[in-house]
Image (spheres, rainbow, N blue to C red):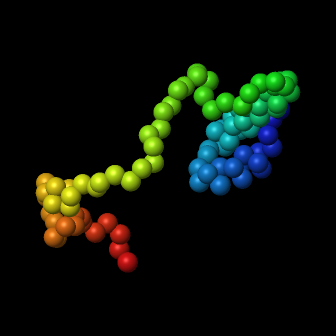
Amino acid sequence: MKLPREEIDAIAHLARLALTDDEADALCGELGAILAHVAALSEVDTTGVEPMTHAVPMDLRLRADEVEPSLPAELAVGAAPDRDGDYFRVPKVIDG
């Protein structure tokens, strides 16, 4: 399966990629092969297979969502290189 050059150009435009003619021609075949492989995977019978988020069984434990005492402000900003009272002072990074 080979993608039309117009589709490659449209994808490159959306991805803000500047492709040479040779690169675009190569992608016509490569992306087509990837899409053909994905289409072949869709034909696999997955009946009875449980959906999963990881290939390896994982036992993730989350702590309880409970309110706990916070760090005192003096301790939190105590080692800050620049502060204004109980607040950190940081350089401005956005104009406006």
* Residue at (35% x, 69% y) in the render: 94
Would you say residue 56 is visible in this rendering?
A: yes
* Residue at (19% x, 67% y) in the render: 86
* Residue at (38% x, 53% y) in the render: 67
Would you say residue 36 is visible in this rendering?
A: no
In the rendered image, the residue lying farthest to the bottom is 96
Q: Nearer the viewer, residue 19 or 92?
A: 92
* Residue at (72% x, 36% y) in the render: 31
Query: Which image quadrant for residue 44?
Result: top right
x then y, percent, for residue 70? 28, 55
16 relative to 2, above or below:
below
26 to the left or right of 60: right
16 to the left or right of 90: right
x then y, percent, for residue 96? 37, 78
Q: Nearer the viewer, residue 87 or 28?
A: 87
Which quadrant, please, contains the N terminus?
top right
